[in-house]
Image (cartoon, grey):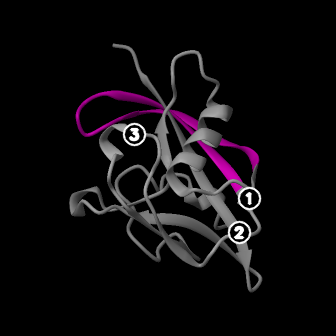
Amino acid sequence: MSSIKKAYGYVTRIKNGKRQVLVFKHPIPEAGIQIPKGTVNDQEDTYYAVIREIEEETGLKDFVIENLIAEDNWENDDGAIHNRFFYKINVSDAPDEWDYQPTGGGDEDGLTFHYFWISSKDEVELIRGHADYLHHIFT
């Protein structure tokens, strides 16, 4: 069985001396609270995929990819195997919260995500799989 490549972004900032991570509330309740992520296109490098996904999903443009935190293979709820790539991303200028309509099309067309920041890995419950490497951010 082949895997589906996924690029995840832990978008971070320092606010009042404390590291924070960007999350969003999905308008479909069962989709829960997530971090920005998406499918890597054919022949696309995961580094460029995470840049594209952050721009499409959050509207942020001025950020820096710090490093690849982790890569793994993970079984999604539908049984598909995801080859996941988690990146740490730094941003210095972003609002405390905002709403944004993703521009990538597909299933997200017409949806509005509500973005906000968390200051610890236990502050909110992210959907399954999204918090797997938060301990690398909140040490």
Residue at image mark 3: 105
Please provide percent x and percent y for residue 128.
Answer: 35, 53
Residue at image mark 2: 13
Name the residue located 56 percent from the left edge and 59 percent from the top edge: 134
- The quadrant holding residue 105 is top left
- The quadrant holding residue 21 is bottom right
Name the residue located 38 percent from the left edge and 68 percent from the top edge: 125
Callout 2: helix, strand or loop? strand
The residue carrying pointer 3 sits among few (fewer than 14), some (14 to 19) or many (20 or more) residues within 10 Å by Cα, namely few
Name the residue located 23 percent from the left edge and 34 percent from the top edge: 78
Q: Nearer the viewer, residue 21 or 139?
A: 21
Please provide percent x and percent y for residue 4.
Answer: 42, 25
- Asked whether the residues under the numbered discs 1 and 3 touch, taking CB atoms below 8 Å apart as contact, a structural biologist would say no
Residue at image mark 1: 90
> What kind of residue is marked 3?
Gly
Looking at the image, is 98 positioned above or below residue 78? Answer: below
